[in-house]
Amino acid sequence: MSESSPSAPVGVVLAVDPDRFAQVVQALRRAGLTVTGEQPILGTLSGTVAEDRIPALEALDGVDSVDREVTIQLPPPDAPIQ
């Protein structure tokens, strides 16, 4: 990938300080996160962001962790066992 092309968006799940949830979510949005789900009581949210913006999200005050979403693809029920 050339340096001039934008980074592809990836799904992320974030753990943030639940006591400052709204503030941290606003900061994450300003840093480029598109929020797709919020769980304020748990202090977690999900969203999409350009992959090259992940370090900026991790650096924000109040963000405990940023993890890429993992999609598990199960084979069809009649597929042979590997």
Image (spheres, grey):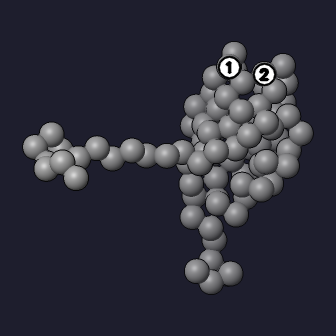
User: Which residue is tagged 1?
Assistant: 42
Q: Nearer the viewer, residue 14 or 9?
A: 14
Question: Where does the N terminus fall, quadrant-wise?
Answer: bottom right
Query: Residue at the spot x=62%, y=39% of the render?
Result: 13
Task: Pinpoint residue 39: horizontal percent, then vertical percent.
Answer: 63, 23
Query: Residue at the spot x=79%, y=36% of the render?
Result: 64
Query: Residue at the spot x=70%, y=44% of the render?
Result: 66
Residue 37's place in the image compared with 65, above or below, is: above
Mark 2 residue type: Pro
Q: Residue lying at the far front in this picture: please name it.
A: 82
Q: Residue lying at the far top in this picture: please name it.
A: 41
**Regarding mark 2 in the picture, which secondary structure is present there?**
helix
Q: Nearer the viewer, residue 76 or 48?
A: 76
Position of 65 with respect to 70 (left or right) is: right
Mark 1 residue type: Leu
**Regarding mark 1 in the picture, which secondary structure is present there?**
loop
Position of 36 with respect to 33 (left or right) is: left
Q: Residue lying at the far left in this picture: please name it.
A: 78
Residue 10's place in the image compared with 45, above or below, is: below
Task: Pinpoint residue 48: horizontal percent, then vertical percent.
Answer: 59, 48
User: Which residue is tagged 2?
Assistant: 18
Q: How much space separates mark 1 and mark 2, taking CA atoms? A: 7 Å
Q: Which mark is residue 68?
A: none
Position of 51 with respect to 26 (left or right) is: left
Give the mark, 1 or 2, whose residue is nearer the N terminus. 2
Query: Residue at the spot x=64%, y=32% of the render?
Result: 45
